[in-house]
Amino acid sequence: MKNFACTIIIFFLLALSGTALGWHDKTHLAVAKAAKYPMWYNAAGPDIAKIKAGDVEGYNHWYNNNWKAEVTPQTVINQISRYNKANVFLDSEGHLYGAIIASLREYEATIETGKYAEYHLVYCAHYVGDLSMPLHNTPYDDFNMRYHAVNDGIVDQEVLEHSEKIEKHMYMIALRDSSFEDDLIREIVRIANISRLLGYKLQAESRNMTPEEAYRQLGHSSSLLKAVLQHYKKTIKH
């Protein structure tokens, strides 16, 4: 009985732990702007949605990776079905990686119905931004809680007026039309592992990101978002 009670307490604490916000608004906007997303000005919207949607939306914004495990394609695949779910036992660790894939599946499905689908792409743009935030890929422990807010806003005061600082770190990502989702999962895995390793480095050195590190991370997000947008520009007829 004592062990059961301890387990319940642990799950409850994990549920409370996932309250981090992510990059601040202007940073999310700048990621989308650097990727040349025409609706870049909506990219902070999913954070606004959390005010009313709570954990249903919130758990889409991070993966705490409590076991500090290497992210694999299976990690991403396992999270897809948890999109917009808020079960305290199954979802409190977060499912950011699966949310990227699931939001695009909803984008495609909504287009098939002939309805307006763009907001699903806005959600994806936001999640792709969160992917490069190191502390959204590591356990929400004492270090994460103490350092999270500062790192969310490390370049927020200047980034929207200087998106070229993100563009400097952008690079070509190939997402083949014939294997788009598989290629996208591969890239999510790659960036997630880069981000979590930087998070561990920050913790080991008890410090915040430097602006240069932040811009390099944002370059990963903008590069991936640009590749996603290019895919749909070729394959979706609006």
Image (cartoon, grey):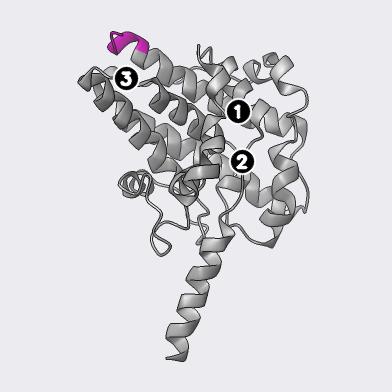
Q: Is residue 162 visible?
A: no
Q: Which mark's residue is nearer the viewer, 3 or 1?
A: 1
- Per the image, label 1 sits on a secondary structure element best described as helix
Q: CA distance from mark 3 to mark 2?
A: 29 Å
* Residue range highlighted in magenta: 233-238
* Mark 3 or 2, nearer chain start: 2
Q: On the image, numbered disc 3 is attached to which residue?
A: 176
Q: Is disc 3 in contact with disc 2, using a CB cutoff of under 8 Å?
A: no
Q: What residue appears at the point 46 percent right and 76 percent down from the top-left corner?
A: 8
* Mark 3 or 1, nearer chain start: 1
Q: On the image, numbered disc 1 is attached to which residue?
A: 28
Q: What residue appears at the point 69 percent right and 48 percent down from the top-left corner?
A: 148
Residue 192 position in % (x across, y down): 51, 41
Q: Is disc 2 in contact with disc 1, using a CB cutoff of under 8 Å?
A: yes
Q: What residue appears at the point 49 percent right and 17 percent down from the top-left corner?
A: 172
- Does residue 108 appear to the left or right of 17 in the view shown? left
Q: Is disc 3 in contact with disc 1, using a CB cutoff of under 8 Å?
A: no
Marker count (numbered): 3
